[in-house]
């Protein structure tokens, strides 16, 4: 297998692992609905709406790229482990 | 019987109330009256529109489908007066709107500068999206701008103007910025950052007059006689709750519309929420103003619930704001300061009167060059905190202060000389 393909698969594996292990969760009482999170979401998830409803971004399309978490000027969003699956030893 | 709900004001308190009503009353007739042509948008988000971080379209949280799901009648227009006895609202075009329950969610409006020249067209304030657009429009053509005032809004304007204007002057009446919320070191940090960004800071400077040439702003003259040439003057000296309708209708009004714990005003079937409401707080025994988005949302939700037949007491959460001050992310929670601030009349936007109710707490601080942490330590609890820079302690402190957690196990360590506060918190709270 070529190095490029290995690296691609590895990236895909890491992404899947992140998806399984964690999700973006909004904190209560911080969001002011400015919309920066939705603006910077590369796949146009309405992150702001999730924050309004106080719901995690549990969309299967979410890339868990962290753009919304990093861009939010008020620290509303963060990654949280879902604890649905045991943590693989290499990620612990 | 179909209940007729009228909500005056289409910002966060009004929208939160409409949502809460709709959750329990699917048939009620809800009318939302707005005198802002842009309706409901994120007012705090205007700061990011000024800096160019987001586009205008992004400021509107609700899509058409979500509006439709709420099933409201949206009326654009001004309210001329309230008639509490007749249970109706009279619009500026003389139309009468009868109500069974009325919510005053009228917000607040920027206080005006009194100096001569303050009514020139290039003297601006930041109340609304229209104001933000006007500031942007003027800033793109301005060579120099002067900002007067304090609190968060003054800095939002300074930072927005800095992106578009070559020269930005910031005038402070005293020596330091936001003296009744920030301590001296925090104020100094903010002003030093602004100066490093190229903002010209003018301490102990008060506007005597805004001068004009051919009907346009040409400069500001201070009481000390200094003349600062500029094309634009932005004023952020505080906000006033919009309580005129209530006052004229004979409702009890102090600084804002006085409401009880159920957010009921002094006339039957009238409620108030958000910046316009002065809300009784059983914790302090005082009726207080808050101009915070999340407090307004919470009040709107409780008012809406009660308008629809509920009997929920409003329990104010510990007021919190997370904002950027000269590029430094800053969390302010609980009681952190006291007294007046020379640059703000009463209350600013994104502000809370609770923040200035600090009495006998001990102050401990921990700082590196870029991060600062100040804790206000009470007998058994933390009563307030200011977190600048690294925000890792921000959320745990929100919980600790908001829930009034007993800090006895770590209190002595926090109060020890040169205590590494961030490390103690990190260790205790598992950060």
Image (cartoon, rainbow, N blue to C red):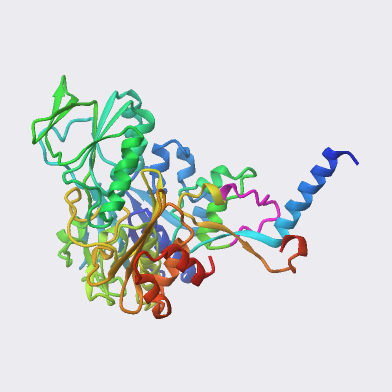
Asked if residue B127 lies left or right of residue B389, the reply is left
Position of B385 relative to A66 (above/below):
below
**x and y percent of residue B417 in the render?**
34, 67
Position of B50 relative to B306 (above/below):
above
**x and y percent of residue B339 in the render?**
18, 60
- Which of A91 and B166 lies nearest the eye of the viewer? A91
- Which of B45 and B145 lies nearest the eye of the viewer? B145
Q: Please say whether residue B205 is visible from this viewpoint.
A: yes
- Which of B193 and B9 lies nearest the eye of the viewer? B193
Secondary structure mostly taken by the magenta-highlighted segment of the chain: loop
Q: Which residues are magenta?
A: A56-68
In the picture as drawn, the residue positioned furthest to the right comes out as A1
Quadrant of the drawing holding the N terminus of chain B: bottom left
- Which of B5 and B36 lies nearest the eye of the viewer? B36
Position of B231 relative to B182 (above/below):
above
Q: Is residue A57 magenta?
A: yes
Q: In the image, what residue occupies the spot 35% across and 38% down?
A: B159
Q: Is residue A24 magenta?
A: no
Q: Please say whether residue B131 is visible from this viewpoint.
A: no
**x and y percent of residue B130 in the render?**
34, 38
Q: In the image, what residue occupies the spot 16% across and 44% down?
A: B173
């Amino acid at each position: 297998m070529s190095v490029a393909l290995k690296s691609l698969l590895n990236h895909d594996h890491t992404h899947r692992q992140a998806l399984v292990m964690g999700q973006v969760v909004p904190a209560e009482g911080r969001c002011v609905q400015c919309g920066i999170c939705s603006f910077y979401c590369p796949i146009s998830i309405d992150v702001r709406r999730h924050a309004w409803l106080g719901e995690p971004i549990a969309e299967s399309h979410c890339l868990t790229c962290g753009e919304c978490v990093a861009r939010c000027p008020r620290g509303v969003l963060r990654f949280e482990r879902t604890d649905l699956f045991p943590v693989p030893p290499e990620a612990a | 019987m179909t209940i007729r709900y009228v909500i005056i004001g289409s910002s966060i308190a009004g929208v939160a109330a409409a949502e809460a009503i709709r959750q329990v009353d699917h048939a009620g007739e809800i009318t939302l009256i707005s005198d802002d042509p842009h309706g409901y948008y994120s007012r705090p988000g205007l700061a990011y529109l000024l800096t160019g971080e987001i586009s205008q379209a992004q400021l509107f949280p609700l899509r058409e489908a979500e509006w439709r799901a709420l099933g409201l009648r949206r009326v654009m227009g001004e309210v001329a007066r309230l008639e509490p006895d007749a249970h109706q609202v009279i619009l500026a075009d003389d139309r009468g709107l009868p109500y069974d329950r009325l919510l005053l969610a009228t917000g607040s409006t920027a206080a005006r500068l009194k100096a001569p020249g303050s009514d020139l067209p290039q003297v601006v304030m930041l109340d609304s999206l229209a104001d933000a657009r006007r500031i942007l429009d003027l800033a793109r053509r301005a060579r120099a701008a002067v900002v007067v005032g304090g609190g968060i809004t003054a800095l939002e304007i300074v930072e927005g103007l800095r992106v578009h204007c070559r020269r930005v002057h910031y005038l402070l009446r005293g020596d330091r910025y936001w003296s009744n919320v920030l301590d001296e070191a925090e104020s100094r940090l903010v002003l030093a950052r602004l100066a490093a960004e190229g903002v010209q800071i003018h301490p102990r400077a008060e506007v005597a007059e805004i001068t004009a040439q051919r009907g346009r702003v040409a400069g500001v003259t201070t009481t000390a006689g200094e003349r600062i040439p500029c094309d634009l003057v932005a004023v952020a000296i505080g906000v006033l709750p919009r309580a005129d309708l209530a006052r004229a209708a004979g409702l009890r009004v102090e600084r804002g519309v006085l409401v009880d714990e159920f957010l009921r005003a002094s006339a039957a079937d009238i409620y108030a929420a958000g910046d316009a409401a002065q809300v009784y707080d059983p914790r302090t025994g005082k009726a207080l103003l808050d101009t915070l988005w999340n407090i307004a949302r919470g009040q709107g939700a409780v008012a809406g619930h009660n308008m629809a037949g509920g009997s929920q007491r409003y329990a104010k959460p510990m007021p919190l704001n997370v904002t950027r001050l000269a590029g430094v992310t800053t969390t302010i929670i609980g009681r952190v300061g006291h007294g007046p601030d020379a640059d703000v009349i009463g209350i600013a936007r994104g502000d809370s009167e609770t923040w200035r109710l600090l009495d006998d707490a001990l102050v401990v601080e921990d700082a590196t060059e870029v991060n600062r942490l100040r804790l206000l330590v009470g007998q058994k609890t933390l009563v307030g905190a200011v977190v600048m820079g690294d925000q890792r302690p921000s959320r745990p402190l929100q919980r600790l202060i908001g829930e009034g957690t007993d800090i006895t196990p770590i209190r002595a360590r926090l109060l020890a000389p040169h205590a590494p506060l961030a490390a103690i918190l990190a260790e205790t709270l598992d950060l």
